[in-house]
Amino acid sequence: MRIGIFFVIDGELISDTLSVEQCQQYGDHAEHGGHYDYWSKLEPTTVIESAFKAHAYDYFPRGRVVLDIKHHQVKLYADRCIDAAVLSAINKAFKLPSNTRISYDEHYQCHRCNQMFIDDFDEMDG
């Protein structure tokens, strides 16, 4: 099982994960990674990564997988617009147990889901 963050760019998954044993513990949860930190440090090597970096870090759908240590429950937080096929791919990539709980959180909203979104990169282009 893997813990970490992910982005969905044009149906492709980009993720930053660690095993549970390698993760940091924050309160009752094992977590890894920050979306902005990952985006800001990424040096694109693929077309998908270049498309990802062409926009603000929160432009594309994203989410995170955490482990609730106290309740022994894996939680998958995801943008509401991520479809079932991509959720299945995330489950497979992160090797999640079948009882993983999927939650939707306002924090994970892409440019389509967040009506207040402004892509700073588009603003710079004029």
Image (cartoon, rainbow, N blue to C red):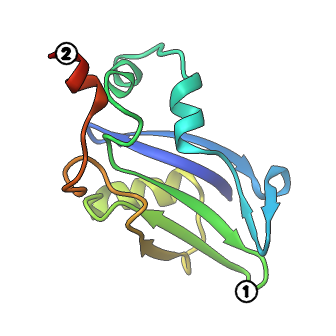
Write down the residue under mark 2: 125
User: Mark 2 against mark 1, which lies toward the viewer?
Assistant: 2
Q: Quadrant of the C terminus?
A: top left
Q: Quadrant of the N terminus?
A: bottom right
User: Residue 12 location, x and y as percent?
Assistant: 35, 38
User: Residue at coordinates 19% horizontally, 51% vertically from top-left?
Assistant: 112
Decide: is 89 above or below 104. above
Write down the residue under mark 1: 71
- In terms of image quadrants, where is residue 105? bottom left
Residue occupying the far left of the picture: 126
Tell me how many marks there are: 2
Residue occupying the far bottom of the picture: 71
Q: Name the secondary structure under disc 1.
A: loop
User: Residue at coordinates 64% horizontally, 64% vertically from top-left?
Assistant: 66
Q: CA distance from mark 2 to mark 1?
A: 47 Å
- Find out whether the residues at labels 2 and 1 contact each other: C-beta distance under 8 Å: no
What amino acid does circle 2 point to?
A: Asp
User: Residue 72 location, x and y as percent?
Assistant: 73, 81
Residue occupying the far right of the picture: 21
User: Residue 110 location, x and y as percent?
Assistant: 30, 50
Tell me the tag on residue 5: none
Residue in front for this viewpoint, 105 or 18:
105
Q: Earlier in the sequence, mark 2 or mark 1?
A: 1
What amino acid does circle 1 point to?
A: His
Residue in front for this viewpoint, 46 or 41:
41
Decide: is 84 above or below 24. below
Decide: is 52 above or below 60. above
Q: Name the secondary structure under disc 2.
A: helix
Q: Residues within 10 Å of mark 1 (few under 14, many from 20)?
A: few
